Amino acid sequence: MGKFVLSALVENKFGVLARVAGLFSARGFNIDSLAVGETEDVTVSRMTIVVDADERTLEQVKKQLNKLIDVIRVQDLTGGRYVDRELIMIKVKAENTNIREKIVQIVDSTGAEIIDVAKKSVIVEETGDEHKIKALVELLRPYGIIEIARTGKIALQSETNGK
């Protein structure tokens, strides 16, 4: 078992996301992360799907995805070079100046950003790979995380050797 990152180009039409999600649920495949957005072509969307599976299950997933009429292309990014990012927003308790200053130091040292300040909390935003996101969460955890909102992974294949 392992995590695999699939990139699927699909027609940007009503119901495509539901059909893809339905394909996974009907076959008992679990989606760890799913992010969907328009591409440079407004008629096409890119789905980045992270699935925890074995090789056999992964092959089934790819075959089933390719059978869907609205799917243009499915690519397994896992074995090659790709760049991925996630976005996280973390609401952290910051009930006094001392704690707020410590949170600001963490944010400054990690490259994150404070995007909202309230009387008893701050909201921190970070973009990066899953290791960077996880590290920030662990640094802020001792101060009291109130809430987390996190996107799914998005990924693009990286060019190798000028290809």
Image: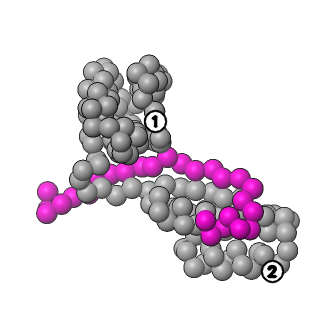
User: Splitting the image into 4 quarters, where does residue 140 fall?
Assistant: bottom right
Please tell me whether residue 2 is drawn above or below residue 12 in the rendered image: below
What range is drawn magenta here?
Answer: 138-163
Which residue is found at the position 14% from the left and 62% from the top? Answer: 162
Answer with left or right where residue 139 lies relative to residue 153.
Answer: right
Q: Secondary structure at mark 1?
A: strand
**x then y, percent, for residue 64:** 30, 24
* Residue 110 is inside the magenta segment: no
**x then y, percent, for residue 29:** 42, 29
Q: In the rendered view of the protein, which quadrant contains the C terminus?
A: bottom left
Please tell me whether residue 111 is drawn above or below residue 41 in the rendered image: below
**x then y, percent, for residue 72:** 27, 30
Name the residue carrying label 2: 98
Answer with left or right where residue 155 lies relative to residue 137.
Answer: left
Three-letter amino acid code of the residue under disc 2:
Asn
| Count of marks, rendered view | 2
Residue density around tag 2, few if under 14, some if 14–19, many if 20 or more, within 10 Å? few
Name the residue carrying label 1: 31
Which residue is found at the position 62% from the left and 70% from the top? Answer: 139
Please tell me whether residue 75 is drawn above or below residue 61 in the rendered image: below
Which residue is found at the position 44% from the left and 24% from the top? Answer: 28
Answer with left or right where residue 38 lies relative to residue 163.
Answer: right
Q: Is residue 61 visible?
A: yes
Residue density around tag 1, few if under 14, some if 14–19, many if 20 or more, within 10 Å? some
Three-letter amino acid code of the residue under disc 1:
Ile
Q: In the rendered view of the protein, which quadrant contains the N terminus?
A: top left
Which residue is found at the position 28% from the left and 47% from the top? Answer: 77
Q: Is residue 42 visible?
A: no
